[in-house]
Amino acid sequence: MNNIVEKQSYLSLNPATEEILAEFTMIEKLEVEEKILAAVEAQKEWKKIPAPVRGESLLKIAGLLEMRADEWGKLLTTEVGKCLRDGIAEVHRTVSILRFFSGEGYRMTGETIPSRQEGILAYTKQQPLGTVGVITPWNVPLAIPVWKIAPAIIAGNSVVWKPANQSLLISQKLVSIFEEAGLPKNLVSMVQAEGPLVGDIFAENENIKAVTFTGSNKTGKVINKLLSTRGIRFQAEMGGKNPFIIMEDADIEQACKDIVTGGLLDAGQRCTATSRIFVHNSIYTTFREKMLEVLDTVKLGPPTEETTIIGPVVDKRQFENIWSYINQAKLEGATLIYGGNELEEEWAKNGYFISPKLFDNVTQNMTIAKEEIFGPVLALIQFSDFDECLKQANDIEYGLSSTLYTKDISAAMKYVEEVDSGLVHINLPSTYSETQMPFGGIKSTGIGGFRELGNHAIKFYTEWKTIYVRSM
Ligand SMILES: NC(=O)C1=CN([C@@H]2O[C@H](COP(=O)(O)OP(=O)(O)OC[C@H]3O[C@@H](n4cnc5c(N)ncnc54)[C@H](OP(=O)(O)O)[C@@H]3O)[C@@H](O)[C@H]2O)C=CC1
Ligand SMILES: O=C(O)CCC(=O)C(=O)O
């Protein structure tokens, strides 16, 4: 079923069953502008509250969310098809993000720098930007918005938030918990409106001082161009086509398990998902057999069942898009060695389920090796020379995450130096990330040069002031 029913209306469907969950009416330009004005007003008082005290509100939200992790996890399952276990894990991850950023209120430090003149105090301090536009995707619909909103508000900003249409239920719930925890009304103002409309408004409305975005490359580039006329700060976190390199001395069994974690959880709908698997030719056959064995243990099924590892993809458009990549891979000569065509089980009848696919004989020039698929599709590429492999791994427009499996420290150090990616993993899945560490990509994965998460995140949301004081 298509989600868009008429111009201003959006149907929320359970991707596992096509059951209608809600119908949303989209708001128009005037209402978006009113929400921006309300957020501007809310920020005027909020910025006066000392940052450590602002942090207490985040702690409160974290506590409320933690108590309701199971209920919220279920909603993630129903609305975007995340497996229950992964939905609950995302809620707990969000709690830890909130706790981390609540502490950042105590760490919004400046510097005191010695003056060359007697009697002059020279120091710096960070100040909020004002009102910030936040645009988020559906694939990590709780943690990503929170890792943008929490640093924005701890730094003293207000937020106008445009969530993806596919995750409006969870987004509404997030806004309601902000209010329940006592955040001032309109400090985080959600706009339930079409993406392109919001992009245009953020670009022209002078009250929006910066925009942060996670989503597709295509949309990120459009927004970047729109904002360039006002030249405001823009941070974009976009696609990945993440390489996973397996050296001849690698622990093959661990590598196979971590390919499942990095490439297939959330049905591969992660910008950090493993998608290109480079395997040394001396272990290729052994690896392939093990990988097929491991894939046999990966249960595709209703996301509500505890043993399910892969649930549905988010909607019909995503389903069709992934299938077009699978068909294109076959046409271009890749060999499908795992995953059939149709699912005949009763539970799969109305859902957007795609079984995991493993392609062999993939070459660098094939579409499947170049474009982000955002689905449970893995591509195998053989290599014999590590330098050549690194060259191929880097020969891509994206640069988000990468992984190397080896016990050889020299190979590992060379890879750390030479791989073109913002996140670098050795013997860990490509999706591995911790809240207190910076997150972000290079090349066309990222725009703006800012990092998210960790204490780096605050930098995007603040302006530096340099202050000279003479005592009289
Ligand atoms: N890097 C990542 O984390 C993600 C990557 N993707 C990639 O993108 C593909 C398509 O997914 P899709 O959901 O369309 O991704 P988009 O990038 O189009 O959507 C992400 C967010 O941007 C909004 N948006 C869309 N157009 C504009 C605009 N002109 N100005 C401002 N905001 C806008 C969307 O709103 P609305 O819901 O109204 O369209 C949504 O909130 C996926 O298959 C995947 O490859 C998708 C999601 C996340
Ligand atoms: O969840 C993460 O750690 C990364 C976010 C992600 O996968 C995405 O933006 O698609």
Image (cartoon, helix red, strand yellow):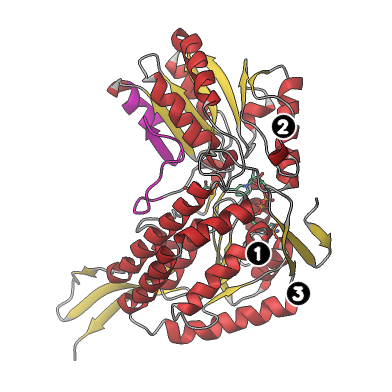
What's the residue type where badge 3 is placed?
Answer: Glu
Callout in the foreground (2, 1): 2
Which residue is nearer to you in this view: 188 or 264? 264
- Residue at figure coordinates x 75%, y 27% from the top left: 327
Q: Residue 287 bears which disc, if any? A: none
- The amino acid type of the residue labelled 1 equals Thr
Q: Amino acid at mark 2?
A: Leu
Residue 8 is covered by the magenta coloring: no
**Rendered residue at 75%/44% (across/down):** 350
Residue 268 placement (x, y as % from top left): 58, 38
Left or right side of 205 for 249: left
Tell me if mark 3 has few (under 14), some (14-19) or many (20+) residues whose alpha carbon lies within 10 angstroms of its own: some
Q: Nearer the viewer, mark 3 or mark 2?
A: 2
Marks 3 and 2, how far apart at CA: 41 Å
Q: As drawn, which residue projects farthest toward the right?
A: 6
- Mark 2 neighbour density, 10 Å: few (under 14) some (14–19) many (20 or more): few
Q: Which residues are magenta?
A: 411-438
Q: Which residue is mark 2?
A: 343
Q: Nearer the viewer, residue 20 or 171?
A: 20
Mark 1: few/some/many CA within 10 Å (<14, 14-19, 20+):
few
**400 lies left or right of 59:** right
Name the secondary structure under disc 3.
loop
Q: Depth check: give the residue in front, 124 or 145.
A: 145
Task: Report helix, strand or loop for mark 1.
Answer: loop
Q: Which residue is labeled 1 in the image? A: 229
In the drawing, what numbered circle is on residue 28? Answer: 3
